[in-house]
Amino acid sequence: HLGVVENLITVGIGKNLLNVDGLDRLNFDPESLSSEPQQLIGTSGTLYGYAALTGKSTAKPIFISPGHRISHLSAARLALLLGKFRVVEPIRQADLISRQYIRIHFSSSLNDAKKEEEKEINNDDP
């Protein structure tokens, strides 16, 4: 939606294969992947995206689909360029930063709530 509204290039990347048009884990062989992305073509003949190994990943691929204003292959190549790890770098950084934010801003609240709960449990003893 953001890509269309703002006319931005967008790419979809997932860690799980979406079961659609005959594509599923049962008929996808991750061992067949090499350094090149593999097309994900449904039983209807529609190209849905690519599967690719990123970074040092040797077993678990990511699944890439074009969003807005980008071709299937360009989306796959872009994802591979951004993939030092299995999760591409922008997503990985967002995850790391959000976890750090939660630790800084909410860890004391969570610890206080846990201590209060333990205190209530201990005071309930007859």
Image (cartoon, rainbow, N blue to C red):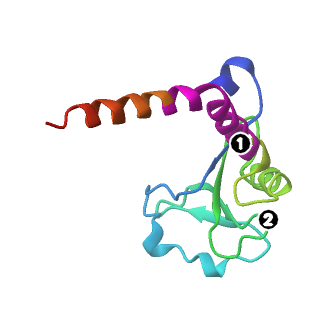
Residue 22 sits in quarter: bottom left
The tag earlier along the polypeptide, 1 or 2, is 2
Read off the residue under disc 2: 55
Task: Count numbered badges in the picture.
Answer: 2
Residue 7 sits in quarter: top right
Secondary structure category for the residue under label 2? loop
Q: Nearer the viewer, residue 15 or 25?
A: 15
Is residue 94 a member of the stretch shown in magenta?
yes
Left or right placement of residue 28 versus residue 38 in this view: left
Residue 87 percent across, percent down from the top left: 70, 54
Q: Is residue 120 above or below residue 52?
A: above
Residue 31 sits in quarter: bottom right
Residue placed at 66% from the left, 60% from the top?
Answer: 50
Mark 1 or 2: the one toward you: 1
Which image quarter is the C terminus in?
A: top left
- Which residue in the rendered view is the most extreme toward the front? 126
Residue 44 percent across, percent down from the top left: 47, 59
Residue 51 percent across, percent down from the top left: 65, 63
Left or right placement of residue 98 versus residue 123 in this view: right
Secondary structure category for the residue under label 1? helix
**What is the span of residues highlighted in magenta in the rendered image?**
92-111
Q: Amino acid at mark 1?
A: Leu
- Which residue in the rendered view is the most extreme toward the bottom? 31
Which image quarter is the N terminus in?
A: top right
Classified by dominant secondary structure, the portion drawn in magenta counts as: helix
Spatial separation of the CA atoms under disc 1 and disc 2: 18 Å
Read off the residue under disc 1: 96
Residue placed at 71% from the left, 37% from the top?
Answer: 94
Q: Amino acid at mark 2?
A: Gly
